Image (cartoon, rainbow, N blue to C red):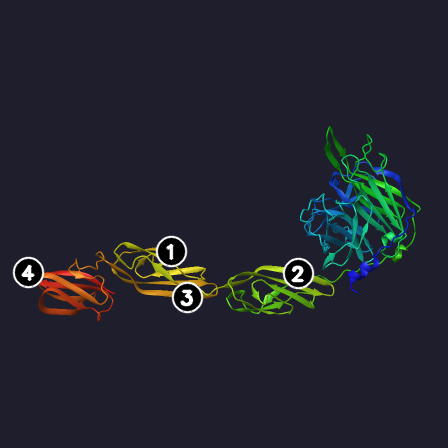
Amino acid sequence: MNIIQKILATVTFVSVAFFVSAQVEEPTFIVQELDTLVNETSGIIFINGKLWTHNDSGGEAKIYCIDTVSGQVVDTKVVAGVVNEDWEDMAKDRTHLYIGNFGAMSRNLQILRIKIEDLENPDLDTLVPRIINFTYGNPDYPEPDFSATSTRFDCEAMIAKDDTIFLFSKNWIDHKTYLYAIPNKANFEHTVVPVDTLELDYLVCGADYDYVSNTVALVGYTYSTLDSKPHITLLTGFEGNKFLSGEHTNQEFTQPSSLTNQSGGITYNQVEGIAFRDSGRLWVTNERVEKSVSFFTLRIPPHLREFKISSPLSVNDPATEPTYPEEPDPIEIIIDTEEDSRIILEGDTISFLDLSTQTPTSWQWTFEGGTPESSNEQNPHVVYNNAGSYSVTLTAENSTSRTSQTFNGYITVYAPAHADFTFDHDTIGENHSVNFTSTSTGATSLLWTFEGGNPETSTEDNPQVTYTSEGVYSVSLTASNPVSSDTYTVTNAIVVNDVAENKSNSSNIYPNPVSETIFLSFNEPYTFEIVNASGVVVLKSDKKTLGTTEVSTSFMKSGNYIARIFFENGSSEFKFIKL
C-alpha cells in the first residue's frame, strides 16, 4: 500500500450522530485594528507563543509576527524563491510551518514547508522553503468556465496532522466542502482527489489542528453583500483521521458584539484565519473590507479576536507529538550528451547522459522530434531525422524525490547545406552589373566570391555585382550552417567586353563572344590574323578573301583576342571574347 492509499484508508468517514461538547464562546478580547502591513491578513498560526500571518494574493512573499495586544507587526521574515500568487492559510506540526499557495488565483498549486527552527532563528531574516507541489485529479478539473467566485477548486484552509496535510475546499458553487489529503513530503508533485465531503453550508476560509485536544477548528462565512455571517466549527473526539467520526459543533455568530462589525448592526465580516492559542483558546482574524453598497461605503479594518473554548479536551501528551525530519535534497536534473555538440545534421544520433544528483532509480525521457519519442533508459540514444529545434524533458525519481525538467531548444538539427544560384546576365559590357540570386538550401550563412567583380565578395542573399574590365570571370558561392558546408562554382560565368553583345551578322565579326566558330565578313579583299591577350599570333591567313570567312576557335583558350584585318589600303582591329 503506497502513502496515498494509506492516507485514504484513514479518512473514510462514517455517519454518526452529532453531540455538543466543546463550544466556542463569545470573544473575550479584541484588537480593533491590526497593523496596515497586514490589511489583507489571511492565514494565521500560533507557534511557541508567537502569532504569525501573511497577506492574501498579490502580497509580498513575507510572513509577519503580530503583537497580540497592540496588533502591530514586530517581526518579518522573507520567504525566498517563491511568489505569493494566492497564499491562503498556514498550518504547523511539531517540526514544520506550512504556507498554502492554493487559492483561486494560484497558477501553481503549492504548499511551502519551512523548518520551525529556521523560523525561530533570530539571525535568519530569509527562510528557504521546500516545495510540496500538487494538482487536482478531479474529472471536472480544470473548469472550462472558471471564475474566482464561481469554482469548486478554491481552497483557503488546511491543517497538518500526522504525516499528512488536509485541505478543506472553499466551494463557491454549492458550499459543500471537499476534503483532500496530501503527504507532507516535498520533492514530489502529488495528484489529489476528494476523500470526503463536509456538509457545512458556508465558505470555509481557515483551519487549524490542536494536537493536545485532538480538535480541528474551521472558520468561514456565508457570503452576502451585507449579511455575511461568520461561522466556527469544531471537530472533536474522532479517531485517526476520521474527522467526522466524533463530535461536531457549528456556531454562527450574528451579533455585532462578536465576530461582526462593531457598529450599526451591520453583520458583514470576511473572517479569514483561525489558530489555536492553546487547547482552550482560539485566535480569529478578518481582513480589511471596503466596499460600496448603494448609499454608503462599508469599511471594516482587520481585527484580531480571542475566543474561549468551553470544556476543552485533553487527549494527547504534547511531548508525544511526532516530528518529521527533512528529506534529502531533491533531485537536480542535469543532462548532457556524449557528443561534443548538440547541433547536428539530419539523421545523426545523440547519446544522452543523465548526470542528475541524488542517484535516481527510474527515468522517463521525452524527445521532441526524436526517434524514439520517449525512453525509460538512463542513457538513451536518439536519432533526429528532420531539421528543427527540439526540447528534451527528463523526469527522474528515487525513493524521496521526483523531479521533472524541460530543456527547451536543447537539440538543433540542420539539413545539409547545398549551394546553388542563378544570375540574370552572362554577357555584359564594361561597367554593367549582374544580379545574383541564391537558391541554396539548409544554409545559415553565404559567402560569394566574384572574380573581376565589385564587390569581390558578399554575404548577402542576392547581391548585385558590377564588372568594370573586359574578360571572362568565374563566380563561386559557399553555403554553410554550423555543421556542414557546400561550394558551387560556375567557371567563365560572366563575359565582359567593351562592345555590345552581338550574335547577328550585322557586324563584320560575329558572334562575339564566340564558343566554337567565328565569322569574318567584309566587302573587299582581306587577309587576317588573330592575336591573344599576350600579343602572340595564334592564327594567320595570307590568302586574300572576299566576303565571309568561317574560322574555328576550338583550339583557342578562353580569353580576350584581337582579330586584325588587312586590306589593300589599310587595316582594322576587332576585339572579341573566346568562351
User: In whole angstroms, how far apart are the C-alphas of marks 1 and 3?
Assistant: 17 Å
The residue at which mark 2 appears reads as 404
Residue 575 in view, yes or no: yes
Residues marked 4 and 1 touching at CB (< 8 Å): no
Q: Position of residue 290 (x, y in %)?
A: 73, 35
Q: Position of residue 402 (x, y in %)?
A: 70, 62
Q: Position of residue 579 (x, y in %)?
A: 25, 65
Q: Quadrant of residue 542?
A: bottom left
The disc, 2 or 4, on the residue closer to the chain's N-terminal end is 2
The residue at which mark 1 appears reads as 462
Neighbourhood count class around disc 3 (C-alpha, 10 Å): few under 14, some 14–19, many 20 upward: some
The residue at which mark 3 appears reads as 486
Q: Is residue 454 above or below residue 278?
A: below
Q: Amino acid at mark 4?
A: Asn
SS for dot 4: loop
Q: Nearer the viewer, residue 300 or 232?
A: 232
User: In whole angstroms, how far apart are the C-alphas of marks 2 and 3?
Assistant: 41 Å
The disc, 2 or 3, on the residue closer to the chain's N-terminal end is 2
SS for dot 2: strand
